[in-house]
């Protein structure tokens, strides 16, 4: 199983970006999925998460600006980021709890991260 994140880049404050995360491999099912971020010198923090049933949860700092969504038909996760601020600058990581076979495993997988830089 592999998660590949994409969509990061450089944007001015107030702009928007849409991150994507594609899961591939021998996937039988995907449970909760989420986005984390890590800024230089800081700990990795939860940005948003979404359950298999579609319930969402957001960090207070991004509520009302970011929207997490998923498309289980293509094993994908998204993060729409609007009204971006310089403090949103970080490497963004996607994660998912996946049931896979060959070998059989239920566990958490992480993408490689995608850089988001917001200029003031």
Image (cartoon, rainbow, N blue to C red):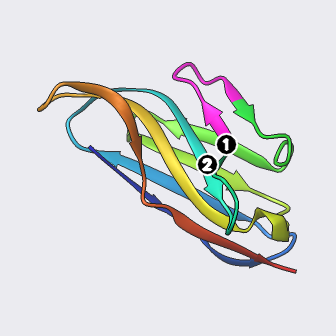
> Residue 4 occupies which quadrant of the picture?
bottom left
Residue 36, numbered circle: 2
Give the magenta part as a residue range.
Answer: 46-56
Neighbour class for label 1 at 10 Å: few (<14), some, many (≥20)? some
State yes or no: residue 51 in magenta: yes
Q: Pick whichever of labels 2 and 1 is earlier in the sequence.
A: 2
Q: Secondary structure at mark 1?
A: strand
Taking depth in this image into account, of 87 and 32 the one nearest to the observer is: 87
Seen from this angle, which residue lies furthest left? 102
Image x and y of residue 47, in percent? 69, 45
Image x and y of residue 72, in percent? 43, 33
How far apart are labels 2 and 1 at the CA level?
4 Å
Q: Is residue 74 visible?
A: yes
Neighbour class for label 2 at 10 Å: few (<14), some, many (≥20)? some
Q: Are marks 2 and 1 in contact (CB under 8 Å)?
A: yes
Q: Is residue 7 visible?
A: no
Q: Residue at x 73, y 56 (%)?
A: 81
> Residue 13 occupies which quadrant of the picture?
bottom right
Query: Is residue 82 left or right of 108 when viewed as pictured?
Result: right
Q: Residue at x 57, y 48 (%)?
A: 78
Residue at image mark 1? 46
């Amino acid at each position: 199983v592999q998660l590949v994140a994409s969509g990061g880049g450089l944007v001015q404050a107030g702009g928007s970006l849409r991150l994507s995360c594609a899961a591939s491999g021998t996937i039988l099912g995907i449970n909760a999925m989420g986005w984390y971020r890590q800024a230089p010198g800081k700990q990795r923090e939860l940005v948003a998460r979404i359950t298999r049933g579609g319930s969402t949860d957001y960090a207070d700092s991004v509520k009302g600006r970011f929207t997490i969504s998923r498309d289980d038909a293509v094993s994908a996760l998204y993060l729409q980021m609007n009204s971006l601020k310089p403090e949103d600058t970080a490497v963004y990581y996607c994660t998912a709890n996946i049931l896979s076979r060959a070998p059989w495993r239920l566990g958490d997988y992480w993408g490689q991260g995608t850089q988001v830089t917001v200029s003031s």
